Amino acid sequence: MKKQTPPNLPLSGEERAHPPLTRGARGVGVDFHVVIPARHSSTRLPGKPLLAIAGKPMVVRVAEQAAQSGAQQIWIATDHHAIASVVHEHGFKACLTKESHASGTDRIAEVVEQRGWPDDTIVVNVQGDEPLIPPALIRAVAEHLHRHPECAVATACHPIHDEASMRNPNIVKAVLDQQGNALYFSRAPIPYPRDAFALPSPASGITSDLAGVISQPSRMASSSIRGAGGEGLPEGLPVLRHIGIYAYRAGFLRAYGQLAPTAIEHFEALEQLRVLYYGYKIGVHIAAQAPPAGVDTEQDLHAARQVFAATIKSEENKK
């Protein structure tokens, strides 16, 4: 089946900030592959990769976005024949992988072995439920890894500025070192602004006992940096929200399967902590803002469908 031209979705902040990374254009200086793990089973949305968005399966919409990043090859890694079949029908490539994989990283590692890619190959993991992912972001993490040979993995973050997001355990935060590599990822609020958070927090409803013992000058200083209503964060506090996209070197993916899971990974429920625990470096690309949300719920699916429908209608009106 001949591939149809995907709708030209609105540019993200990432793409507006990097004009050379035009949609559909292949950049220079870095070659990389994209692998999209697409598992059929899903607790909240069974068969999620096959759910239709503007007339095409979600996984195909993701692949179309990846195709605009300049990737050399795009592969869908799946455990289900129906997903592989529909991917082929729309002109993309699929690898059938084991059903037993515990994570998308393990599934991608199997693709690396199946394809026999050299150890220095850069492989970007694009989640199969992100039909609105900006192509520029995909390329940015690949380029970051290419520019930092000391890193085995690259990922992305963007700044956050409100206390509610910082305290939200569903938002993963990251702290970086001087070179811009990850020191730690956590669902907890890190780095923790001790003096500011010692005051009552209208945003979270939490009141610290420390508020009663700190000095009046300290109260005034903390109040001035929290902002009106106490919902802001101290000026200059480097709070970064993790974006769940990764670029790996193929050699690292081969080694990853031999790394035993760790306690911090288990308790935080963050797979990337295994990488740090064993001493590998994770480089971090700083994006201007968050990419559009992925599809986890029926509400997310409805929102994605609306974006595609509006974009397609707008393009048709221009003809």
Image (cartoon, helix red, strand yellow):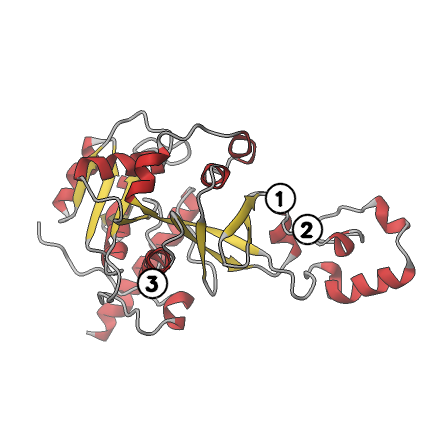
Amino acid tagged 1: Ala
Which residue is labeled 3 in the image?
136
- Which image quadrant is residue 237 in? bottom right
Tally the marks.
3
Q: Position of residue 276 (x, y in %)?
A: 49, 41
Q: What residue type is disc 2 on?
A: Tyr
* In this view, the mark in front (3 or 2): 2
3D distance between C-alphas at marks 2 and 1: 9 Å
Q: Is residue 63 left or right of residue 147?
A: left
Task: Give the x, y percent position of residue 162.
Answer: 63, 58
Q: Nearer the viewer, residue 49 or 186?
A: 186
Residue 176 tag number: none
Question: Which residue is denoted by mark 2 in the rendering?
Answer: 192
Numbered badge on residue 188 = 1
**Extreme-front residue of the structure:** 150
**In the structure shown, which secondary structural element does the residue marked by tag 2 occupy?**
loop
The disc, 3 or 1, on the residue closer to the chain's N-terminal end is: 3
Label 3 residue SS: helix
Q: Is residue 250 above or below residue 226?
A: above
The residue depicted at 44 percent of the width and 53 percent of the height is 283
